Structure formats: C-alpha cells, structure tokens
Image (tube, helix red, strand yellow):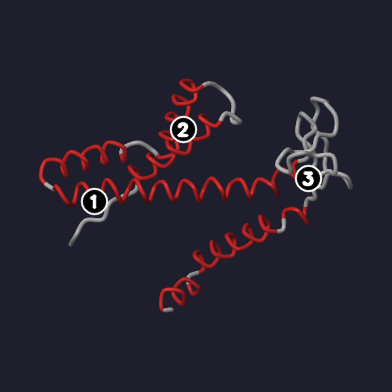
C-alpha cells in the first residue's frame, strides 16, 4: 500500500501507469475499436485497401491513413497492442526464469563460477541494449531463415531479447 501511494504521487510513475492502463484497455477493446473485416480469417492481418505505393492521408474510411501498401494504420496500431503485450509477457517470463537460474547457480556454487558469470554479464552491460538485441536477432534470423511468420524466427527473437535483457540489467551490489 505504501509503494502504491508513492507511485501515485510521483508524476513520472503516474504517467507510466496511466499509459499502461490505456494500452491495456485498447488491447482488451480491440475487437470493438477496430472490428476485423467479415471475410478475414485472422483478426491480426491488417486490412488492405488496394495496392498503391503512395500512402493516403487520413480520411473517414481510414482514421490514421494508410501505408505504402494501403494497409490501415489505425487497425494495425489497435491490434498491434495485443501482439506487443503477448511478446512482452513472454519475454518477461523467459527473462525471469533464465535470470533466476543463472543467479541460483552463481549463488549456490559461488567462487570462480560466480565470477565468470558476473564477467559475462558485465561484457553484455557494455553494449547498448537495443543495439545488442537487434544484432543478436539479425544473426539468429539469418540462421533460421527470413520471415516473422516462421515460428523458429519468432522463438529466436524472443530468446535473444530475453538473454540480452537479463545480461544488460544493472546488478545490485550488497552494501
């Protein structure tokens, strides 16, 4: 309760909480905010309104306009929140499991193994998170082949983001 009061008093954390709640509401209400077309087999496939290479400005039919391939931007943003939450939750779960495993091994055995794991972690901390994640996902994508629809590519990207996230988080030192 004390933590919640402190979070709500801090303007930055309050803004973050409000943004998170707004995105959760958008993800839940996606079928009502941007109903999928009747003939669509998959709600996550963004509707297309032609094949022109020229994007269109916002109109009554397309609230945010369209992209170069005439994909509806509004529909993509609304349904994209669900995808972002799914991937974010999976990455957080993997990060927690892998981090607990590595930390338990380092804590249980200690000594040279702990030092080795900490040096590996410090090497990863030297690189910017986003740059390391992009590099690792690119390498894994070349191994498993192109395309986001490929399950192995998606699994490789989630694993890469999880590993980089674990190793780039600053560790707390006892003090």
Residues under numbered marks 1 and 3 in contact, where contact means CB atoms less than 8 Å apart: no
Q: Residues within 10 Å of mark 3 (few under 14, many from 20)?
A: some
Circle 2 residue? 156
Give the spatial CA distance, label 3 vs label 2. 32 Å
Left or right of 10? Residue 168 is left
Q: Is residue 139 above or below residue 175?
A: above
* SS label for mark 3: loop
Circle 1 residue? 104
Residue at x 49% of width, y 75% of height: 9
Of the residues under marks 1 and 3, which one precedes in the sequence?
A: 3
Left or right of 131? Residue 148 is right
Q: Percent from the top left, x then y, of residue 54?
A: 81, 28
Q: Residues within 10 Å of mark 2 (few under 14, many from 20)?
A: many
Of the residues under marks 3 and 2, which one precedes in the sequence?
A: 3
* SS label for mark 1: helix
> Which of the two marks, 1 or 3, is nearer to us in this view?
1
Quadrant in the picture for the N terminus: bottom left
Give the spatial CA distance, label 2 vs label 1. 24 Å
Quadrant in the picture for the C terminus: bottom left
Q: Residues within 10 Å of mark 1 (few under 14, many from 20)?
A: few
Residue at x 44% of width, y 29% of height: 135
> Which of the two marks, 3 or 2, is nearer to us in this view?
2
Left or right of 98? Residue 10 is right
């Amino acid at each position: 309760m004390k933590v919640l009061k402190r979070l709500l008093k801090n303007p930055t954390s309050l803004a973050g909480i409000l943004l998170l709640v707004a995105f959760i509401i958008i993800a839940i209400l996606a079928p009502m905010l941007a109903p999928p077309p009747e003939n669509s087999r998959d709600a996550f496939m963004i509707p297309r309104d032609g094949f022109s290479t020229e994007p269109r400005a916002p109109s009554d039919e397309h609230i945010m306009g369209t992209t170069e391939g005439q994909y509806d931007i509004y529909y993509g943003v609304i349904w994209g929140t669900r995808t972002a939450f799914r991937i974010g939750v999976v990455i957080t779960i993997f990060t927690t499991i892998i981090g607990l495993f590595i930390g338990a091994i380092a804590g249980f055995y200690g000594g040279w193994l702990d030092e080795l794991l900490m040096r590996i972690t410090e090497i990863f901390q030297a690189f910017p998170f986003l740059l390391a994640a992009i590099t690792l996902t690119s390498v894994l994508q070349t191994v498993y082949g192109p395309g986001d629809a490929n399950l192995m590519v998606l699994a490789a990207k989630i694993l890469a983001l999880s590993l980089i996230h674990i190793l780039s988080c600053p560790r707390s030192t006892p003090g």
